Image (cartoon, rainbow, N blue to C red):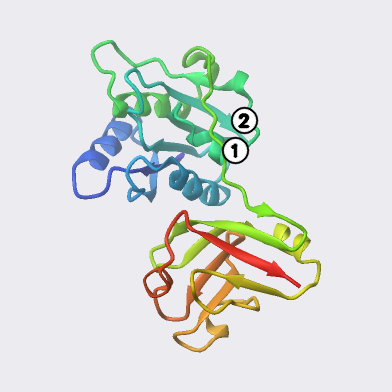
Amino acid sequence: MQIVSLTTDYGTKDFYVAELKSSILTKKTDFTIIDISHEIDHFDIVQAAFYVRNAISSFPEGAIHIIAVNCNYKRKSEYICFEKDGQYFIGPNNGVFSLIFDDVDGDKIYSIKPPSSDNGSVSAIFSHAAAFIGHGLPISEIGPVVYNFSRKLVIQPVVTSNQIRATIIHIDHFENAVVNLKRDMFERVRNDRNFSLYYKQNDPITFLSKDYGDVAIGDALAFFNSAGYLEIAINMDKASSMLNLFKNEMIQINFY
C-alpha cells in the first residue's frame, strides 16, 4: 500500500484532520496514512519544513507527502505538486517547499487543478492530487507548470574565522532547543580548537556530549542530535523553560 504523510497546522481539537483523512481515503481506499505532525505552529512554514525535511528520508520510494500549513496564504491561493528523489509532494505554493529543498526544478512543479468547479476546498484539492498520483497517472497532467514557484530564504548561521552565531529554530516536545547548525560546519570552523558556547546569561558550554546521560541530572549540555543539528538540553529537565531559550533567539560559539 502506498503511504501518504500529513503535516498540518490543524491541531487535533477540531474535525479538520479527520475531514482531510476521510477525503483522501474516499478517493483511494488503500492508502496508508502516516501523521508527521498536526501541531505545527499556526501558519509556520519554517517549522513545517523542518519537520518534513528531517522525516522524509525514513519514507520509501513512492511516498506522497501532503503539507497543509498556511494553506490560505493569499486571496487566490495556489496548490502544487511535484516529484523529488522518488517521492511526491503536495501543498500550497507559499514557500514551504523551498525551505525543504534548495534544488527543486521549477519546470517540473505543477499547479493542481481543482477536481470540480463545485468543490475547490483544500481537502478536495489535496485528496484529488494524492489519488491522481496513487493511480499512477502522469503528474505532468495534473495541471499546468507553475508560473511562479515561491521561494523563501533559509536562515543560515553567521560564520567568521573565530566565531559562529546561530539561531534556535525549534523547541521540541521535551523543550530541548534545536539550533540551525550542522556538525560539518561546526567542525570545519572549529578546526580542532577549544570552544565556548554562550546562550543567554548562562555559563558557557565548553564540550560536546554524546547524549543526555553524559552529564549529571539537571546539568546543561550540547550535542549533535540524530538529525545532525546542534541541540542544547538539560538532562532530565526542560531547557527552554529552565534556561529561557526560545525559538528565533541567537546563540554564539567562540573558538580559541
- Residue drawn at 63 percent across, 52 percent down: 157
Element class at badge 2: loop
Marks 1 and 2: in contact by CB < 8 Å? yes
> Could you say where residue 20 lies in the image, as x and y percent from the top left?
28, 36
Q: Residue 104 carries which label?
A: 2
Q: Name the quarter where the N terminus is drawn.
A: top left
Using the image, tell me which numbered label, if any, was put on residue 214.
none
Between residue 138 and residue 179, name the one nearer to us: 179
Residue 217 placement, left or right of 206: left
Residue at mark 2 to residue at mark 1: CA–CA distance:
6 Å
Where residue 37 appears, x then y in whole percent? Answer: 37, 50
Which residue is disc 1 drawn over? 101
Q: The C terminus lies in which quarter of the figure?
A: bottom right
Tell me which residue sits at (70%, 62%) in the image.
163
Vertical placement of residue 209 versus 95, above or below = below
Report whether 211 appears left or right of 76.
right
- Above or below: residue 91 compared with residue 108: below
Q: Which amino acid does label 2 sit on?
A: Val
Position of residue 7 measured from the top left corner of the image (x, y, whole percent) = 39, 43
User: Which of the 4 quarters of the picture holds residue 214?
Assistant: bottom right
Residue 241 visible somewhere in the drawing? yes
User: For residue 94, which quarter of the picture?
Assistant: top left
Q: The residue under label 1 is which amino acid type?
A: Phe
Determine the residue located farthest toward the front in the rendered image.
201
